[in-house]
Amino acid sequence: MKSIPIYLTILLFSFNLIFSQTTNIESPPFKAGENLEYRVHYGIFNASYASLKLSNNDLNDETLLASGYGKTIGLARFFFKVEDYYSSYFDIKKVKPIIFKRNIYEGGYTKNLEVYFDSQLKKATVNNIKNGTVKEVSTKANVQDLISSLYYLRKNFSEENIKVGDYFKINMFYDSKNRELALKFLGIETINTKFGKVECLKLMPATNRSRIFKGEGSITIWLTNDKNRIPIRVQADLLVGSIKADLDKFSGVANPFNIKVKS
């Protein structure tokens, strides 16, 4: 079960699209003070809680701090305790990561990392606090960390420049490695949420069959089709059952939440 919470964290925090297209979104899609809270369900069970918060910080005036937190709740916590903390300092204008921190506990599995990015030299310095090691790793252009990538997507994505069925390559620096992921744009879909009917952009990352996931088409994410581009739902079909993460609460968003029909 260890890999399920880890991958859910990736799903919620980091579907890391790096697009070459320009955006037509005039208003910023996010700002300091934004708070997103999610409930994660495994079948009929309310299994986990996750949150994403944006704030100003003491690094400098041109950066934002994104803080991610996730934990198992209820009966799931009794069987498998998860307590995950993530943070990303990134440049506001270009959404370039500067510092990334990951401190997790997942059923006895722990990891404590700090990553310092140098976008000009295309390298990352990885401080493994748990193991007491420091190493430098070359990175790719437009690299994003696990958290900053979500905000890069929200800032730059425009469905007007994307055809349904197109794939996009994703550059992500995760677990001290450069990773590449392809994500398919499935079009626009209106879904029912606790807030009402919401028009969304539907995306599907390419996945291979594994001991957890069924394979291609196993994971789907929905972003609100408004100026906020909020990830409102993530669903993963597993070999046994499915996991769904839904936006439960939100505050401090930069633009009006576009709800077609309120509940």
Image: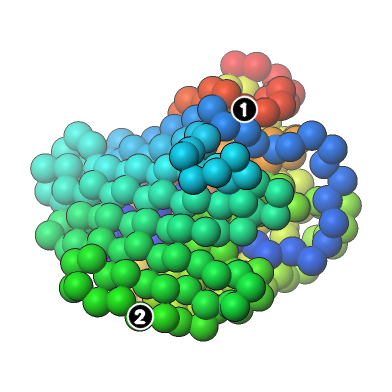
The quadrant of the rendering that contains the N terminus is: bottom left
Q: Amino acid at mark 1?
A: Val
Quarter the C terminus occupies: top right
Q: Where does the image place residue 216, in percent across and percent down from the top left?
A: 55, 72
Above or below 226: residue 158: below
- Name the residue: 54% across, 23% down: 251
Q: Amino acid at mark 2?
A: Lys
Q: Which residue is mark 2?
A: 135
Residue depicted at 59% across the width and 40% down the height: 61
Callout 2: 10 Å neighbours few (<14), some, many (20+)?
few
Front residue (pair 36, 95): 95
State left or right for residue 56 relative to residue 79: right
Quarter of image, res 50:
top left
Which numbered mark, 1 or 2, is in the foreground of this view?
A: 2
The quarter of the picture where residue 76 lies is top left
Residue 38 at x, y = what percent? 43, 36
200 sits to left or right of 247 = right
In depth, the one of 122 and 8 nearer the eye is: 122
Q: Nearer the viewer, residue 31 or 156?
A: 31
54 with respect to 69 (left or right): right
Dot 2: element: strand
Write down the residue under mark 1: 253
- Residue 172 bears which disc, if any? none
Write the residue at 71% across / 49% down: 93
1 or 2: tag closer to the N-terminus: 2
Residue 238 in the image: state x and y as whole percent: 39, 61
CA gap between label 1 and label 2 equals: 37 Å
In the rendered structure, are the residues bearing label 1 and label 2 in contact, judged by CB atoms less than 8 Å apart? no
Question: Could you say where residue 84 lies in the image, as x and y percent from the top left?
Answer: 29, 49
Model colouring: rainbow
What residue lies at 54% left-to-right and 27% top-to-bottom? Answer: 33
